[in-house]
Image: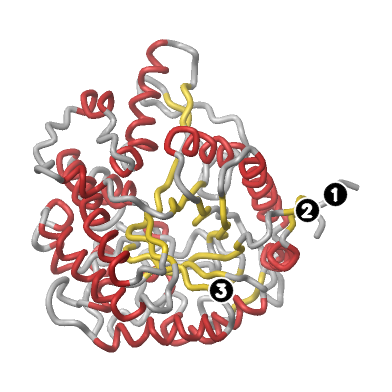
């Protein structure tokens, strides 16, 4: 029988969520409208015609949810803060009840011995800012910095890790280029502007965190999708290089001071008019960690037709490619040498089959997590300073444009009763966290 794989001492095991996906209470205690509240009202925008009004009702059940984290033996919890809860009009008046909620959550976590890992933006922009052109408007970056200052001033003495943004790629590309996500725009030009202003927001905020919470780590969470040419042809290889620039280099390279990837900028025809003097210096403010979200790979064809993907897939139709997480970490470290990395999201939506007691025996999710965690260990063995792993997601939740159809959780949520039931994967992951080692048969 193979020996369990031991992780380094003090390696952090946690799980992750985001505000709009779990909180609900969208109309309570002074919260303002977000772009996702508005987007959910658009006919056909959400696959099952649902919304985030209740979601997992975490706003009311946070104590129960922290207890779940504690029972599972997880040492850290990554969550996001809803900007519309804190500053409902995007700028200006602060909603104290919103701050109070996150203060209660953070204190509850600390009392349970769980480290809070906060993300300041996970896609829920105040709608009033979108009415003023959203992330296409440079002013939104400064509004974000003001919002961040408000939050960090209140919680910075207790939260020891702050991420500015979650996956700005998704905000800019799916929100402004393809229209699949809120605010539902379809403009390549807008997506360039949004991407730059998101990064500007990040760069403006890092010094604020360092000033107000000098004992805290400050970083950003980016998603990476390693891509490969479908065929070994010059055409597919060229298309792959451009795709790689957009998917994997567009955000990380400006952050490390390299500017935007020139090959992709040229191929996509961006005139870079949004870049003002000193912007790139602001964006490249030193960070303490890089959060890495990894799910799958992509195969690229020169003619944009769907490639024949040979590997098994999740319910999202994403190939299961565990070695990609090692390849991503190794490439990032070889190229950019960040001080530390966290796997801030990794997980799988699968077609869960609950029994009569709402238990899900998701051996396939255990396989997914096991194989990816083993690859994280391989990256650590090769010298990449990965300090923690957060499974996505703690709960089944509102999966954006898919509504409640896709379930990523290691804990099942019965949306009719709000009952939480740990799946087999949660029980397995709990043993990983408690033993600091991974084996398929823990």
Q: In which quarter of the image is residue 50?
A: bottom left
Left-right relation of 266 to 392: left
- State the colouring used for the structure image: secondary structure
The first of marks 2 and 3 along the sequence is 3
Mark 3, secondary structure of its residue: strand
**Tag shown at residue 439:** 2
Characterize the local packing of mark 3: few (<14), some (14-19) or many (20 or more) Cα atoms within 10 angstroms: many
x and y percent of residue 435 in the render?
A: 75, 64
Left-right relation of 367 to 245: right
* Real-space CA distance between mark 1 and mark 3, rounded to the nearest whole angstrom: 34 Å
User: Which residue is at a point 28% across and 67% down the rendered structure image?
Assistant: 211
The answer to whether 314 is drawn above or below residue 216 in the figure is above
Q: In which quarter of the image is residue 255?
A: top left
User: Which residue is at a point 27% across and 78% down the rendered structure image?
Assistant: 85
User: Which residue is at a point 9% across and 42% down the rendered structure image?
Assistant: 277
x and y percent of residue 246 in the render?
A: 32, 35
Give the residue pinned by disc 1: 3
* Real-space CA distance between mark 1 and mark 2, rounded to the nearest whole angstrom: 7 Å
Characterize the local packing of mark 2: few (<14), some (14-19) or many (20 or more) Cα atoms within 10 angstroms: some
Q: Residue furthest right?
A: 1
Give the residue pinned by disc 3: 413
Closest to the observer: 433 or 57? 433
């Amino acid at each position: 029988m193979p020996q369990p794989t031991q992780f380094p001492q003090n390696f952090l095991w946690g799980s992750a969520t985001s505000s709009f996906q779990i909180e609900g209470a969208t109309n309570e205690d002074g919260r303002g409208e977000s772009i996702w509240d508005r987007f959910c009202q658009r006919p056909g925008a959400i696959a099952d015609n649902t919304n985030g009004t209740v979601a997992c009702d975490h706003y009311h059940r946070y104590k129960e949810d922290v207890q779940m984290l504690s029972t599972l033996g997880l040492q850290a919890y990554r969550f996001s803060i809803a900007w519309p809860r804190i500053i409902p009009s995007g700028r200006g008046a602060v909603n104290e009840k919103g701050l109070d909620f996150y203060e209660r959550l953070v204190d509850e976590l600390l009392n349970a011995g769980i480290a809070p890992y906060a993300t300041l933006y996970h896609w829920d922009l105040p709608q009033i800012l979108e009415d003023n052109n959203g992330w296409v408007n440079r002013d939104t970056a400064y509004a974000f910095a003001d919002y961040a200052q408000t939050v960090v001033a209140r919680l910075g003495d207790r939260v020891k890790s702050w991420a500015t943004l979650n996956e700005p790629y998704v905000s800019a590309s799916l929100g402004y280029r393809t229209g699949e996500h809120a605010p539902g725009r379809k403009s390549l030009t807008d997506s360039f502007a949004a991407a730059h202003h998101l990064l500007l927001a990040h760069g403006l905020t890092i010094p604020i965190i360092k000033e107000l919470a000098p004992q805290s780590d400050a970083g950003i969470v980016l998603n990476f999708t390693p891509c490969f040419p479908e065929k070994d042809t010059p055409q597919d290889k060229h298309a792959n290089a451009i795709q790689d620039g957009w998917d994997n280099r567009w955000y990380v390279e400006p952050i490390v001071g390299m500017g935007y990837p020139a090959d992709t900028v040229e191929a996509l025809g961006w005139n870079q008019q949004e870049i003002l003097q000193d912007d790139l210096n602001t964006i490249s403010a030193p960070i303490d960690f890089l959060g890495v979200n990894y799910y799958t790979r992509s195969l690229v064809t020169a003619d944009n037709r769907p490639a024949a993907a040979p590997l098994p897939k999740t319910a999202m139709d994403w190939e299961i490619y565990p070695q990609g997480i090692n390849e991503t970490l190794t490439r990032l470290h070889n190229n950019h040498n960040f001080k530390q990395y966290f796997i801030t999201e990794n997980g799988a939506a699968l077609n869960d089959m609950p029994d009569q007691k709402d238990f899900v025996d998701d051996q396939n999710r255990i396989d997914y997590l096991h194989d990816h965690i083993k690859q994280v260990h391989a990256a650590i063995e090769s010298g990449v300073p990965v300090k923690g792993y957060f499974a996505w997601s703690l709960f089944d939740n509102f999966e954006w444009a898919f509504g409640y159809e896709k379930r990523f959780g290691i804990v099942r949520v019965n949306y009719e009763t709000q009952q939480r039931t740990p799946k087999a994967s949660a029980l397995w992951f709990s043993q990983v966290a408690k033993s600091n080692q991974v084996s398929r048969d823990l």
